[in-house]
Image (tube, rainbow, N blue to C red):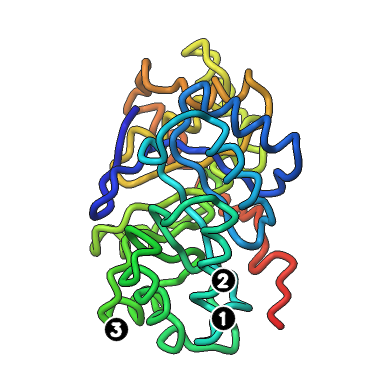
Amino acid sequence: MKFIPMGSVQVPAIGLGTYKLTGLAAIDTFLEAFRIGYRLVDTAQLYMNEDEVGKALALSGLDRKEFIVVTKVWPTNFTSDRFIPSVKESLKKLRTDYVDLLLIHWPHPQFKVSQYIQFLAQAKEEGFAKEIGVSNYNIEQINTAINAGIPILTNEIEFHPWINQRSIREHMQQHNMPIIAYTPLGRGMMVKDKIVADIAKEHQRMPAQIVLRWMMQQEDIIAIPKATSTKHLLENLNVFDFTLSTAGMSKIDSLANDNLRVVPAQPGAKWD
């Protein structure tokens, strides 16, 4: 496994995305992922599965220190009377005293970043998070947080070969902020791309493995694909024993020209 440092935390370059995984089936999926070797798990208040993640962590039989746990605060909790209590509630559900990374989930359309970013820093200061970051922030919003002196270490954004994130990525690189890439397989659509399929055939690999390997050969990408079957969980994790050529990497790079976003801004958002 490759690891990417974020302050005091060494983050596995591939983790488990959990969006829309709930109930007993989700717990089974998480336990299988942990058995296979996943040690990074990404959840959020919005996902309504922090409790399932917490149960799986407890049932895994592994020490809490083995895992990197990420959760995200939803914008309805961005007020001074709700932010820290919501974090405490997340920790209770996760059955842990802290998360390794605590992120702002989406910027609130009515609240200025400068109004609530301080609460994120407070959560770290009080020991509820080892490190902090944001999600779905643009360049201006990142600058606001940085200028406020808040030590954000990552920005979790939609990232896959079909989306052009060059500007935000270059800005993040200037501030030594790795990307946590959600929907790294474009909600499954990337595996149907002809260029990806041709490269997969050349390497005798699955298309998903080609996309994830493309990410692993870059220094600043952490991918959190979602999978529920043992087969796909294994495939997504087993991408460290082959290498894409420079030509292959360039071919996949070129797909960003399509600039296809698969996640709408603030999906299903309810701000009040």
C-alpha gap between disc 3 and disc 2: 23 Å
Residue highlighted by disc 2: 86
Q: Is residue 57 left or right of residue 249?
A: right
Residue 103 is tagged as none
- Mark 1 vs mark 3, foreground winner is 1
Residue 257 visible? The answer is: no
Q: Nearer the viewer, mark 3 or mark 2?
A: 2
Percent coordinates x, y for residue 170 in the rendering: 31, 60
In the current view of this chain or complex, which residue is farthest to the top?
Answer: 204
Local crowd at mark 1 within 10 Å, few (<14), some, or many (≥20)? few
Q: Residues within 10 Å of mark 2 (few under 14, many from 20)?
A: some
Numbered mark located on residue 148 in the image: 3
Residue under the image location 54 percent in, 20 percent down: 234
Instruction: Assign a secondary structure to mark 1.
Output: loop
Which quadrant holds the C terminus? bottom right
Question: Which circle's residue, 1 or 3, is located before the other in the chain?
Answer: 1
Three-letter amino acid code at the position of disc 3: Ala
Q: Earlier in the sequence, mark 3 or mark 2?
A: 2
Q: CA distance from mark 1 to mark 3?
A: 21 Å
Mark 2 and mark 1 in contact? Answer it, CB < 8 Å.
Answer: yes
Q: What's the residue type where badge 2 is placed?
A: Ser
Residue 84 image position (x, y, % from top left): 49, 75
Where 93 sits versus 112, above or below? Answer: above
Whether residue 232 appears in this view of the structure is yes
Separation (CA) of disc 2 from disc 1: 6 Å
* Point 33% across, 67% down: residue: 152
Amino acid type, residue under disc 1 in the picture: Arg
Q: Which residue is mark 1?
A: 82
Out of 89 and 213, give the one closest to the viewer: 89
Q: Secondary structure at mark 3?
A: loop
Q: Quadrant of residue 222?
A: top left
- Quadrant of the rendered structure where residue 221 is? top left
